Amino acid sequence: MAEQKLYVELPCFTGRNVPIAEIAKAIGKDAQYVRVGLQQGVLKFGVAMKMENSNDYNYYCPDRKVWEETGYFRSKLSNAG
């Protein structure tokens, strides 16, 4: 029996930093849930970096990682919706 191959068309990833609010809406959660999940390392589609001498965090959620973990993708050229 011949081996079957599956080809998947991948989205055009750009490394876009997907905003927390956009991710939260896409996965049906509150933005604070996403922020805390990233801070605690529970959510794996991005990183939370605590700023030195501050209680503030910066977040980086690259579009490819968000897609791999959640299935959500929107190019920056697409209309938000």
Image: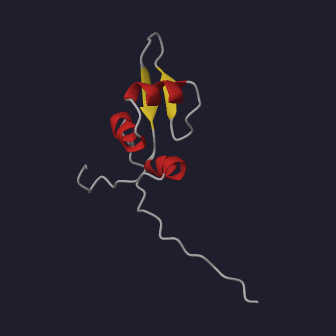
Task: Kindly identify the residue that appears in the image at 26 percent across and 56 percent down.
Answer: 77
| Towards the viewer: 41 or 17 | 41
Q: Give how far across and how far down residue 2 sits, in percent.
A: 73, 89
The front one of 81 and 9 is 81
Q: Which residue occupies the foreground of this view, 6 or 50?
A: 6
Please state the total of marks drawn on the protein image: 0
Q: Residue furthest right?
A: 1
Which x, y percent locates residue 79? 23, 54
Q: Is residue 80 left or right of residue 46?
A: left
Q: Is residue 66 above or below residue 38?
A: below
Considering every residue shown, the one lying at the far top of the view is: 53
Residue 22's image quarter?
A: top left
| Residue at x-position 45% and y-position 36% | 60
> Which residue is found at the position 38% from the left and 42% from the top?
18
Above or below for 76 versus 34: below
Instruction: Give coordinates of residue 41: x percent, y percent.
Output: 59, 29
What colour scheme has been applied to the protein in the rendered image? secondary structure
Q: Is residue 70 above or below residue 51?
A: below
Taking the image as shown, residue 44 lies to the left or right of residue 61, namely right
Which residue lies most toward the left here? 79
Q: Could you say where residue 63 lies in the image, as x and y percent from the top left? A: 43, 49
Residue at the farthest bottom position: 1
Q: The N terminus is located in which quarter?
A: bottom right
